[in-house]
C-alpha cells in the first residue's frame, strides 16, 4: 500500500495539551486575584469597606474572568492588564 501524497494528508491538530491550558488559566487566575485583592484593600483606605462575602465573590469572579481571558488571548493579555494598573 502506497502512502498518501502530501496534498491529501490530514493537517496535524494544533490543539494544546490539557496541562498547558490549566497552567495558562491558573496564571491568569492568580493575576486576577492579585488585582482584585489590591482593589479590595484600597476600599478601606477610601472609607468604603466591602463586606467579606462581596469582596470574596468579586475576587473569585475576577480571577475566573482573567483566567478565561488568558486562555483565549494568551499571556500577552496579562501584560496588558498589569500595564493598566495604577
Image (tube, rainbow, N blue to C red):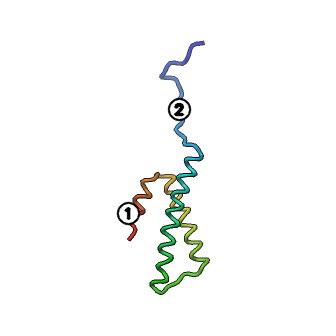
Q: How many numbered discs sit on the rendered protein?
A: 2
Using the rendered view, name the quadrant where residue 85 is placed.
bottom left
Query: Residue 82, how many percent across, how many down?
Result: 41, 63
Residue at (58, 51) in percent of width and height: 22
Q: Which label is found at residue 83?
A: 1
Question: In which image quadrant can residue 46 be found?
Answer: bottom left
Q: Which residue is painted at 55% across and 72% down in the image? A: 58
Above or below for 16 versus 24? above
For the residues labelled 2 and 1, the Cα–Cα distance comes to 36 Å
Element on which disc 1 rests: helix
Callout 2 secondary element: loop
Estimate how packed mark 1 is, as few (under 14), some (14 to 19) or many (20 or more) residues with alpha carbons within 10 Å.
few
Residue 37 placement (x, y as % from top left): 51, 72
Q: What residue is shown with label 2?
A: 12
Where in the figure is residue 81, as x and y percent of width and height?
A: 42, 62
Mark on residue 58?
Answer: none
**Mark with earlier residue (2, 1):** 2
Q: Residue at x 59, y 72 (%)?
A: 57
**In this view, 18 is above or below 32:** above
Amino acid at each position: 500500500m502506497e502512502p498518501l501524497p502530501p496534498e491529501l494528508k490530514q493537517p496535524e491538530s494544533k490543539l494544546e495539551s490539557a496541562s498547558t491550558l490549566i497552567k495558562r488559566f491558573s496564571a491568569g487566575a492568580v493575576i486576577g486575584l492579585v488585582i482584585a485583592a489590591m482593589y479590595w484593600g484600597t476600599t478601606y483606605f477610601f472609607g468604603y469597606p466591602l463586606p467579606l462575602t462581596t469582596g470574596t465573590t468579586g475576587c473569585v469572579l475576577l480571577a475566573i474572568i482573567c483566567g478565561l481571558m488568558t486562555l483565549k488571548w494568551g499571556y500577552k493579555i496579562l501584560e496588558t492588564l498589569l500595564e493598566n494598573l495604577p
